[in-house]
Amino acid sequence: MPVIALEEVSKLYGFGDATTVALDEITLNIEPGEFVAVMGPSGSGKSTLMNIIGLLDRPTHGIYELNGRSVSRLRPNQSAKARRDTIGFVFQSFNLLPRLNVLENVALPLAYKGMLHSRRLKRAADMLERVGLGDREYFMPRQLSGGQAQRVAIARALVNNPHILIADEPTGNLDSAASRLVMELLSDIHKSGTTILMVTHNPELTRYATRVVFMHDGSIVADEQSEIGDIPKLARKTHYSIPKTTEEDDLAGVSALMQAIPEKDEAQKKAVKKKKPKAKIFRPRATKRGKR
C-alpha cells in the first residue's frame, strides 16, 4: 500500500478571473522507502505539492491519502498530530531558532509531545551524534557553518522518528563540500527505511534518488525510476542543456574588455582635441616715447 496516494489533486488560489492553478490534477503514488526527487522550473508547483503532502495545506480538489487514511477527514488537531508524528521537514533556510542552542533546537519538537525535559535532551543529544555534531550541542546557530546548521535541521526533523522526510532544496544555501555531506546523510537516512521526498534544481543530486518526478505548470510531465548513483536521462538532458561558461569564454570576455578600454581612451583623446581653444586676453602694445 502506498504511504502517499494523490488522486487528481488540484490547488487553486484566488477567485474568478484572478484564479491561479498551482496544481492541476496531480496523481502520484509513493511507496514506503522510496527516495523521490522532485524537479522543475520555478513556479512549477513543487513547493505547493510538498506543502500538501506535508499537511501544511489542503488541496482544493482531489483525494489525498496518507498511510491509507483520507486527509480530508482529519480535523485540524488530528492533522497537526499526524504531521508531528509522521513527517519531518528540512528547509533551505534551516529555520533554527537563534536564541536556542543546538541541543535545544533539536529537542524542541519533543516538547510538543509532552516528553520530560531530561528525556528529550537525551534523545536530541543522540540524534546530534548521529549527524556528526555531538561536539556542537551548546553552540548557538550563529556559530555554525551552513553545512552544520543544515545537519542540525535534519537532526531536528528526525528526532520524532518520522516515516517521511520532506526536504525542500536542502542544499540550496550550501557549497559543494557541505552539499555532499548533507546528501550522504540523507542517503544514510534513506537506507534506514525512511521515505524521502526532496525538491531540487540540481540534476547531480538525483544520483541519490530511486525515482525522479518532473513538474511543469502544476502538472507532472515525467516520472522516471532510477538506480542510485545514476542521473536519469531527462535530468541529464536538463543538466547539459544549461549553458555553461568555460575558460575560453572567460578569456574571450577579458579580451573583449581589454579591446574596449583603448577604444574608450581614444574617444577621450579625440574629445580633448575638439575642445575650443581658450580665448586670448588682449593687451595693447606699449608705445615708445618720442625724443624731445
Image (spheres, rainbow, N blue to C red):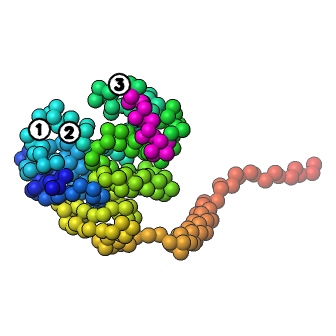
The answer to whether 159 is drawn above or below residue 283 in the figure is: above
Residue at disc 1, secondary structure: loop
Q: Position of residue 96 (x, y in %)?
A: 40, 36
Question: What residue is shown at x 41% (from left), y 25% (from top)?
Answer: 118
The amino acid sitting under disc 2 is Ala
Task: Sort mark 1 into few (<14), some (14-19) or many (20+) by Cα contacts within 10 Å.
Answer: few
Quarter of the image that includes the N terminus: bottom left
Look at discs 3 and 2 and give the one toward the viewer.
3
**Residue that carries the numbered disc 3 in the rendered image:** 116
Is any atom of residue 277 visible in this view? Answer: yes
Task: Sort mark 3 into few (<14), some (14-19) or many (20+) by Cα contacts within 10 Å.
Answer: few
Task: Sort mark 2 into few (<14), some (14-19) or many (20+) by Cα contacts within 10 Å.
Answer: some
The stretch of residues the image draws in magenta is 119-133
**Residue that carries the numbered disc 2 in the rendered image:** 82
Tell me if label 1 and label 3 are in contact, CB under 8 Å: no
Residue at disc 3, secondary structure: loop
**Residue that carries the numbered disc 1 in the rendered image:** 74
> Toward the viewer: 180 or 210?
210
The amino acid sitting under disc 3 is Leu
The amino acid sitting under disc 1 is Leu
State the CA–CA distance, disc 2 to disc 1.
Answer: 9 Å
Question: What residue is shown at x 36% (from left), y 66% (from top)?
Answer: 228
Residue at disc 2, secondary structure: helix
Tell me if label 3 and label 2 are in contact, CB under 8 Å: no
Q: Position of residue 261 (x, y in %)?
A: 59, 66
State the CA–CA distance, disc 1 to disc 3.
Answer: 28 Å
- If you read the primary sequence from the N terminus, does the residue marked by circle 2 or circle 1 appear first? 1
